[in-house]
Amino acid sequence: SKAASTVSKYGKLWGRGYESFPPKLRRILSVSGKGDHATTYLQGLVTSDLFSEPKAPREEDSESLRALEGLVSSSSSSLNVDGGSGGLEEPMEQEVPVQFTSKMRSTCFLDHRGRILTDALLWKRSLDGEPVNTANNDNAATTTEYLIDVPGDAADALLAHLKQHKLRRSKVTLKDRSDEFSIHAVYGTLNAEGAPPGYLAAMDPRHPSLGMRVLSVGPQAVSKDEGATKEETGRGDFAEDEVGNDRQSSSPSQPQTRPERELRQKTFETLMNNHFPPAPGTYRVLRTLSGIAEGSELATRTALECNLEFLNAISFSKGCYLGQELTA
């Protein structure tokens, strides 16, 4: 991949492209409950403040932006042939305001010693179709769900951690929804508005240069041509236990079909191929260049040691939470 031909206030963007994450790289855990039960439950387990809106990432200083603009202009000129465009330039995109709201935020889970269990991205949505625009709109009649986008190598440990701290009075439901939803990243754009029905989209809250994150969650995001009904996607092949973990049915009479996540991924790739080229492996490159660790790479370290406050994952003003002594 090559750097994009536009420079935003957050620095130079990566080239246009997209990639999908298999379960071994990213998984989705769910915490849901009526009213503010899910928010209150997670508030005591994460380092970010779920009752306030997240801050926008730090913008680049003007001197750095001028230097980047010069590099991009020089790079673009070298691609032209006899003053023509040569067909090699990245398409220019009008810069749009980047919104950072409680719909998606970065956070971190700590153990009882104050050591990192894992980092995560938290998506907040209403299961009743109500819009989620602010951090404090959890109506008592509304079912709120947090989708935890977590590195695959830390998902099992995090799910066990959530179960361990789910008290009998905690009116929340925990599930592993990794086989139901698909996770994607789109690069070279700052416009995360206007996602199609069935998709959640937001710029990475740690820094926009890491791309736009996309979750395929709704029935509209599965192509009917791929056999996307509940029966065809093999949901009948799974039973759900009391804590929401999917277990494979042993009935030999039920057909073995593609998991719903694979169907969603195929639909997303078909949608994106008309606008962005596939760019597998880009996210790992961007993470490495940015010095951002994830999942088991952070395990047993402290949040401040890993500079998570610069990735908008820590609040120094919220109340008590598990393991706060070494952080706040």
Image (cartoon, helix red, strand yellow):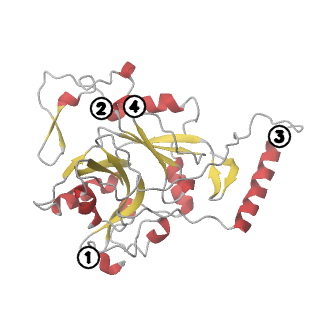
Q: Which residue is mark 3?
A: 80
At x 16% / y 62%, what residue is drawn?
164
Amino acid type of the residue tagged 1 in the rendering: Arg
**Crowd band around label 4 with a 10 angstrom C-alpha radius: few (<14), some (14–19), many (20+):** many
Mark 3 vs mark 2: which is more N-terminal? 3
Q: Which tag is nearer the camera, tag 1 or tag 4?
A: 4
Precedes in sequence: disc 1 or disc 4: 1
Q: What secondary structure is found at the residue carrying circle 3?
A: loop
Q: Which residue is mark 2?
A: 259
Q: Secondary structure at mark 2?
A: loop
Label 1: which residue?
113
- Coordinates of residue 90 in the picture (x, y in percent): 70, 41
| Quadrant of the rendered image containing residue 156 | bottom left
N-term mark: 2 or 1: 1
Q: CA distance from mark 4 to mark 3?
A: 39 Å
- Please name the amino acid that badge 2 sits on: Pro
> Quadrant location of residue 178?
top left
Q: Amino acid at mark 4?
A: Ala
Which residue is located at x 46 percent, y 65 percent? Answer: 312
Q: Earlier in the sequence, mark 2 or mark 4?
A: 4
Q: Nearer the viewer, residue 102 or 112?
A: 102
As drawn, the label of residue 221 is: 4
- Across and down, in percent, residue 247 comes to 16, 39
Residue 154 in sight from this viewpoint = yes
Q: Amino acid at mark 3?
A: Asn
Horizontal side, residue 130 vs residue 214: left or right: left
Mark 3 and mark 2: span between their CA atoms? Answer: 46 Å
**Side of 105 where 81 appears, left or right:** right
- Distance Cα–Cα, label 2 vs label 1: 38 Å
Where residue 177 appears, x then y in whole percent?
27, 43
Query: Separation of disc 1 and disc 4 at Cα?
Result: 41 Å
